[in-house]
Amino acid sequence: MPQQSPNAFWEQRYSAAGKIWSGRVNAVLEKIAAGLTPARALDIGSGEGADVLWLASRGWDATGVEISATAVLRSEAAARAQKLVERAHFEVQDLSRWTPSHHYDLVTASFFQSPVELNRTGILRRAASAVAEGGHLLVTSHAAPPSWSRMAEDPADPTKFPRPQSEVESLGLDGGGWQLLIAEIWERPGRGPEGQEATMKDTVVLARRR
């Protein structure tokens, strides 16, 4: 595991390259949010902003919090290009110290997993505390490494690749304050850096605050 702080690692990764991600909304978020009434949304670890921009384009007032200043600059540029600056907002935050200052009707985190040490559970628990009454929390994670990864040769580490039940328990979603709607592994087609085809497995957890 790289011996860097999360801030340094992710800023170096974004600043050392051009655009990293596809710019497309994550498929799980697209499917789930399509059935919700647009209101106020928060995206944790928003990267280059694709999920926030998609939500904003569908009428949500969406905010992304991200540890990398370079990624936020790219997100803001994309919001200007797509004329979404009134509904798409981005913040640079040290997530290890970040505390949400508002409540949201949808809080989402897509593949919020890091190769450097990060208090993922603590951050996601704080994010969950920002879900308004009747609002939703959606957490999508890699359930296993891709077949082309060297990590695929070893059993998937449950702390790095959470399964549905462990995700529910670690985030405290099995208590009376939440209605658990989805806790499943979903599959989707994937393609590796050299064109390798594979089936990707994602842990999907959706809960509604009572």
Image: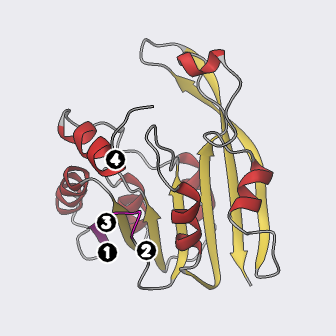
Crowding near the residue tagged with mark 2, few <14, some 14–19, many ≥20 C-alpha atoms within 10 Å:
many
Q: Secondary structure at mark 3?
A: loop
- Identify the amino acid type marked 1: Arg
3 or 2: tag closer to the N-terminus: 2
- Identify the amino acid type marked 3: Gln
Crowding near the residue tagged with mark 4, few <14, some 14–19, many ≥20 C-alpha atoms within 10 Å:
few
Q: Secondary structure at mark 1?
A: loop
What distance separates the C-alpha of mark 1 from that of mark 2? Answer: 7 Å
What distance separates the C-alpha of mark 3 from that of mark 2? Answer: 21 Å
Residue highlighted by disc 1? 87
Residue at 67% x, 38% y: name it. 143
User: Could you say which quadrant of the image residue 129 lies in?
Assistant: bottom right
- Please identify, in this view, whether the residue under mark 2 or under mark 4 is nearer the observer: 4
Residue highlighted by disc 4? 5
Where is residue 31? Give x, y as percent: 61, 55
1 or 2: tag closer to the N-terminus: 2
Residue highlighted by disc 2? 60
1 or 3: tag closer to the N-terminus: 1
Residue 208, above or below 11: below
Residue range highlighted in magenta? 87-97
Q: Which mark is residue 93?
A: 3
